[in-house]
Image (spheres, rainbow, N blue to C red):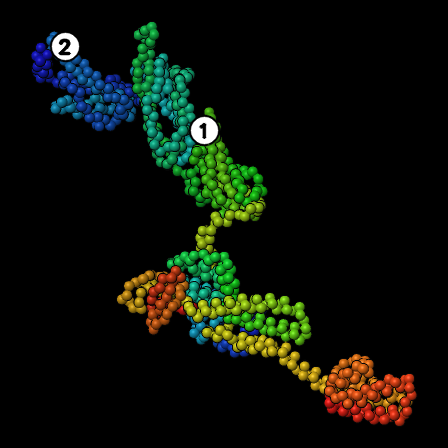
Amino acid sequence: MKKLLSIFILIAIGFSQIQVKVNADPKTIYEGDAFTLTVSAENGGEMPNVDLSALRDFRVASGPSQSTNMQWINGKMTSSYSLSWTLIPKKVGNLRIPILNINVGNKSFKSKPIKISVLDRSKMNNKSTANSGQKFFIEATVDNKSPYRGEQVTLTYTLYTKTDLSGFDILKLPRYQGFWTQELYSPSNLQLKEAWRGSDKWYASVVKKMALFPTKSGEIKIDPMTAVVGVREKGRRSFFFSSSKEFTIATNELSLNVKALPKTQAGRSGSVGKWNISTKIKSKEIKQDEALSFLITINGEGNIKTVDVQDINFPRELEVFEPEINIKQNELTDKISGSKTIEYILIPRYSGKIIIPSIKLLYFDLGLKKWRTKSTKQIALDVKENGALSSTSIGLTKKEVALLDKDIRYSDESEPNWRRINSPLVSKLVIIIFILSIILYFIPGMLHISRSRLDETKGSRIAKKAYKKSISILVENGNAEEIYSSIHKSLNMFMNLKLNKEVERSSVEIITKIQKQSMDNSLSNNIKEILDRGDAVRFAPVSNEKSKNDIENIKILLKELDQKW
Amino acid sequence: MVKKISIISILFCFAFGIHPQLIEKYQNGIDSYSNGNYQLAIQEFEDILKHDWESPELYYNLGNAYYRQKLVSGSIWAYEKCLVIFPSHKDAQYNLSLANLNVVDKIDLPDLPIYLKWYETIRNYFSLQNWIKLFVMSLFLIMLLMTIRKTLYQNWLKSIENIIIIELIFIALLCGHSFLESKSNSEGIIYSPVVIAYSEPNEYSSKIVEVHEGLKVNILDNNEDWVNLELLDGTIGWILKSQIREL
């Protein structure tokens, strides 16, 4: 039975003709409104295959959605496969859906072109009734159509409606090519207010606000945004659900003419807006190797995320770490503003005076329409020496690099010390000094010898005179006492001169000395006899003749002694 | 004492006398250097050297002229030469360190232990000739003190004498070391931009190492055309005599 049925169906399809229909609805719309393009194939047995690449004036908002329909009419089966798209025109005027190539199975068909007329929304108020069907639309507006590059442009999407809307959903946001964007406002539900456009009363609600910062100059297009709007349908209200119909709508396309920033000699910068800059440091007096927080604050109006100071050249005495950046943005304002703090951690590696240079912020002032540079005062740090030994190892490899940008020292113009090339290692001067020092070495020895010789000769000279001197003090004419004491004195003097000494000797001492020196007992005995007599003369008188005889004797004895000494 | 030495040596110079024409040449060289004519300055200075007269100032200024003329090897040679005569010439040391930055070859030497570093610093304070002069002077001083002590019986001089004797022994060791070193190896500066050292004194032998201008090397042996050199790291090779300038 089943087999039979399938054969039957095959026959039915085989014999029934394939019909392809292309339909657009509605055919007259406003700019930004959508229409539905349906391609259906009857008796095709499968989905048609449509090439939409020829659609140049329209954008596909959604689709394709597929539907299949099978009917038995009078024992005849009709099948219908259809594809539908939601299309949004790209421009205003009389547009055409071109001839489309449609394939069903192996067969190909060509559709007829369809005319679509798109009306300009701004002229809608002049026409009274023709467009009364227009119940809602979305408008995109910007506050400034010719901004500078980097200047903020506020883009506002506003929904206008005359009917009761059940829902609103943004389907697709454009990509905002050529802009740096930030969302400013996006309400969770519609807040409708009365608004008048011409003579018509509308209810309007801002659905989205964006801050756009153009990143290039020239003409930049903002693509339309598409959204889905739900409209309540009257009269078809059930107990629980209000039924609604969904429409896809799109905004108008906008184009901005972005002005390039004028050239400046002051440097390179992409900052635009109105800015102020300040720096803060906790204490100007710190210790070496102690961390220090250096805070740069930029506040004002403009693209707070991209604003930046000019490159900072910290002195080499400071070790600088990557800065920490914090951005605080003021909320609920149409113009983006706020403050940005850049916190550097600095560690002075040397003591002394270290200067943190002035920080410069170059920006294009939108109020004055020219470049401005704001700068901070430079800060002089007073770095005290660290008690511990400083780690100078940080800069070791830097030494050669530092040398590269120094130059050689200037020429030496002092009077040169000329000398012969290959002059001998040991100069004449050296030899002279060497000889002199050797001579010096022998001087003390030589001095000693000569002096001792001198001393010796002098002594002998005196000794030689000893006999004569000692004879001369002998008293020849006097009493016996005087004569004998002179004999004693003369002997003593003789000995003193001979021995180079000044000593008083007794008679016994004189005798023993003479005995030792002369080794002649008779001589010493003779002298002893005379001396004994001299000692005795004080107690026993001696005749003058005897004393005179003794004088003569002692002279002879002294001579004898002098020869034997 | 150094001043004394230099004063005496100046007197010596006047006694023997450098030719006034050479002094004129020297002045001319200085003037052309300050006028920026470095080529002429080099010519004049080198001419004086050819007449067998030298001075540390001459070598220093010659080095500067070579440096300005961007002849690295010449400037290094002249600065080294200046430091041989006057090892504590601060400006020459500084400029030599700058010139050495331009040398392609960098041979790292191991760091000396600290006591050897001190020793070398002291040894490089004077040239060998000045060390010998210092030795003789202190010998003379000792003899003088000894004579005074012995003739005038000043025994307290004995302690000063002992100190000088210790110093004398130290200087004697220094002189001995420096003397042996100067006898055993002479040094030279590579003069050609790129020099290939061969294993034997001919061009057919195998190439050992490639050195670049400005490098300081030890000269071990001399041949008619070839020089046997030793790099600071110990590599030995032969190069042509024209490619090196002896210090």
Give left or right: position of A565 versus B45: right
Q: Quadrant of the rendered structure where residue A235 is?
A: top left
Q: Amino acid at mark 2?
A: Trp
Name the residue at 60% across, 76% down.
A441
- Which residue extends farthest top? A239
Q: Position of residue A372 (x, y in %)?
A: 48, 40
Residue that label 1 marks: A335
**Which of these two is toward me, B164 or A160?**
B164
Give left or right: position of B143 versus A123: right
Give left or right: position of A408 versus B237: right
Q: Position of residue B161 (x, y in %)?
A: 61, 69
Does residue A348 show up? yes
Name the residue at 24% across, 17% down.
A25
Specify the label residue A72 is tagged with. 2
Name the residue at 47% across, 29% down.
A329
**Which of these two is toward me, B125 or B110?**
B110
Give left or right: position of A400 versus B146: left
Does residue A372 show up? no
Q: Secondary structure at mark 1?
A: loop
Q: Quadrant of the rendered structure where residue B191 is?
A: bottom left
Q: Chain of mark 1?
A: A
Q: Amino acid at mark 1?
A: Lys
Task: Please tell me if label 1 and label 2 are on a single chain.
Answer: yes
